[in-house]
Amino acid sequence: MHQDSFKPSNELTFATVLPDSKRLAHFVRDNQAESLRLDLHDVVLCDSAGLALMIEAKRLCRQYNKTLAIEGMSNTIDALAKFCGVEAMLSPESE
């Protein structure tokens, strides 16, 4: 199965997330693959806007009948997701 990856900026914050959000929308809409990946390996800073981008990626994939795997989520991002109460929304089971 072919999987394409979306790599956001290395900082996912209120100050930086808008361009990534626009790129993400185009990536999901225009991609022919049924299974996509959100590659967070290079993300060094993330706030709640970054979490919102990840949730939006899941929502867009559902809208376009695609699956999304989130890869490379750091312990810091995972802890932020738990603190904000959105970890279940980002889990593979939330497809």
Image: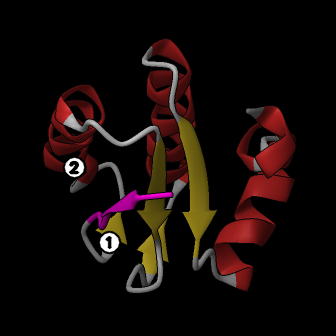
Q: Which quadrant holds residue 77?
A: bottom right
Q: Is residue 89 left or right of residue 46?
A: right
Q: In the rendered image of this protein, does residue 94 appear above or below residue 3?
A: above
Q: How is the image coloured?
A: secondary structure
Q: Is residue 28 left or right of residue 59?
A: left
The three-letter code of the residue at mark 1 reads Glu
Q: In the rendered image of this protein, does residue 93 appear above or below residue 83?
A: above
The one nearer the camera, 50 or 57, is: 57
Taking the view exactly as shown, the residue that stands out farthest to the front is 1
Question: Mark 2 near mark 1, Cβ–Cβ under 8 Å?
Answer: no
In magenta stretch: residue 40: no
Q: Is residue 51 left or right of residue 93?
A: left
Residue located 41% across and 58% down the image: 2
Residue 5 x, y percent position in the rendering: 35, 63
Residue located 72% across and 62% down the image: 80
Q: Locate the C terminus and report the quarter of the image it occupies.
A: top right
Residue located 44% across and 24% down the image: 60
Which mark, by number, is residue 3? none
In magenta stretch: residue 5: yes
Residue 74 x, y percent position in the rendering: 64, 82
Reading the image, the residue beneath label 2 is: 20
Residue 11 x, y percent position in the rendering: 32, 72
Q: In the rendered image of this protein, does residue 31 appear above or below residue 91?
A: above
Q: Label 2 to label 1, Cα distance in Å?
A: 10 Å
Q: Magenta residues, as a range?
A: 1-8
The three-letter code of the residue at mark 2 reads Asp
Q: Secondary structure at mark 2?
A: helix
Residue 17 x, y percent position in the rendering: 27, 49
Which mark, by number, is residue 11? 1
Instruction: Single out the mark in the foreground, 2 or 1.
Output: 2
Q: Is residue 53 left or right of residue 78?
A: left
Q: Going from the N terminus, do you reach mark 2 or mark 1 first?
A: 1
